[in-house]
Amino acid sequence: MARYNTEQKRELIDFLTRNSSRSFTVEEICRGMEADPRYISPPGRSTVYRLIPKLLDEKKIRHFSSEEGRRQVYQIMGGMECAGHMHLKCTACGRLYHVSVPVSMALSSEIEQTENFKVSAGETVIFGTCSHCLKGDKK
Ligand SMILES: [Zn+2]
Ligand SMILES: [Zn+2]
């Protein structure tokens, strides 16, 4: 039983890691894993709901509110590195991008100096439209 849970957790992390630039609702995680033949016994919704708080606790994933703020979406974290930089969220396709640390630090210090406001880079998400969507690519 415990081993089975561990396996499902591992597969869930594997799925999110393979799609590390995207964020998913629980529903999308389930559908995505079911559609992928790599996962022999994809976890059901109740299992995903149960695993997500654990992964949040372990800081393996982070959660965002979707554009409308009505849905919770989840995305794998690149370990502790993600705590040190800002992220860009595309409102058209939902992808999340990591801002490089130098750019992130430059923006933070600019705001800190001009606005006298200390930015928490790891918590900061800038919304906009990504290069794929600007080009009109379908995802
Ligand atoms: Zn990041
Ligand atoms: Zn996009």
Image (cartoon, grey):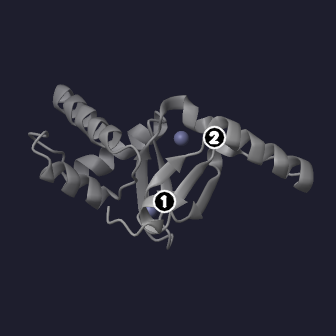
Residue 19: x, y in percent?
33, 45
In this picture, residue 139 sits left or right of residue 8: right
Residue 45: tell me if it is visible: no
Q: Secondary structure at mark 2?
A: loop
The residue beneath circle 2 is 85
Q: Quadrant of the N terminus?
A: top left
Q: Which mark is residue 55?
A: none
Is the residue 72 above or below the residue 5 in the image?
below
Residue 14: x, y in percent?
28, 35
The residue beneath circle 1 is 131
Ligand 1's quadrant: top right
Residue 8: tell me if it is visible: yes
- Judge by depth and name the residue closer to the eye, 6 or 36: 36
Amino acid type, residue under disc 2 in the picture: His
Q: Residue at x 32, y 66 (%)?
A: 138
Q: Quadrant of residue 103?
A: top right
Can you tell me whether the CB of the residue at mark 2 lies under 8 Å from the nearest atom of ligand 1?
yes
Amino acid type, residue under disc 1 in the picture: Ser
